[in-house]
Amino acid sequence: MHKLLISNTFDDFLLCDGEIATAGTVLLKGKINQNFFDMDELASLKDEFIYWKEIKHIAYETIRGNKVPCKLKLIFALSKTKYEEIIKKSGMDIHPSEIGGLYIHILYEKNQIVIITGTSLNTFTMDKTLDKYWDNAVTSFLAQHFDCSIM
């Protein structure tokens, strides 16, 4: 919980969606509310979701105390600004606009954490190079930051 809520481990990921069940359930919707921003601010936004670092304090306030939540579900996405780098490293021959999203689903429930990766492409392909690269990249990220077993 410390790495998720206090440290900057996940700060560079975008929050798509979240659910925290404690005494009540708090839903976190990461989609940017365009009505909140002026035209100049909107023009500078590269992604449609908010960065975790900008909203994690709400999750922290919801969870803080000496009880863990009954359920914690977070769906993170990689920023579109990193797609070109990921494509280059993966060796896949696609344009960044062909990537719909690169995701990390985190589910904590019944004292167990399950993390699932997801990829979404805007075009059909049988090539799973990007999927495999993203799985390996997330596995490496987790191994770097956590002492965990990966299946």
Image (cartoon, helix red, strand yellow):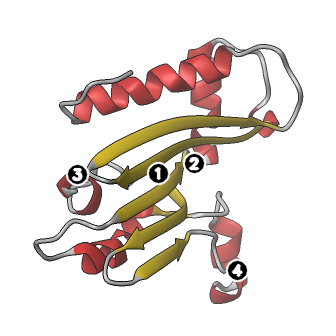
Amino acid type shown at disc 1: Phe
Question: Tag 3, which secondary structure?
Answer: helix
The residue under the point 38% across, 63% down is 71
User: Mark on residue 137?
Assistant: none
Label 2 sits on residue: 79
Report how far apart the C-alphas of labels 2 and 1 lie in the structure.
Answer: 7 Å
Q: Which percent across, then down, holds residue 128? A: 71, 16
* Disc 4, SS: helix
CA neighbours of label 4 inside 10 A, class few (<14), some (14 to 19), many (20+): few
Indicate the quadrant where residue 42 lies.
Answer: bottom right
Q: Reply above or below: 75 against 81.
A: below
Q: In this orientation, does residue 111 appear?
A: yes
- Left or right: where 11 falls relative to 18: left
Q: Position of residue 23 (x, y in %)?
A: 31, 83
Label located before the other in sequence (3 or 4): 3
* Residue 28 falls left or right of residue 131: left
Position of residue 13 relative to residue 65, above or below, is above
| Residue 69 x %, y % | 29, 67
Badge 1 element: loop
Q: Which residue is mark 3?
A: 3
First in residue order: circle 4 vs circle 1 = 1
**Of pointers 2 and 3, the one earlier in the residue sequence:** 3
Q: Secondary structure at mark 2?
A: loop
Q: Amino acid at mark 2?
A: Ser
Q: Amino acid at mark 3?
A: Lys
Q: In the picture, which quadrant includes the C terminus?
A: top left
> Which residue is labeled 4 in the image?
34
Q: What residue is disc 1 on?
A: 13
Residue furthest front in the image: 110
Contact (Cβ within 8 Å) of mark 2 with mark 1: yes
Depth check, front residue: 44 or 120: 120
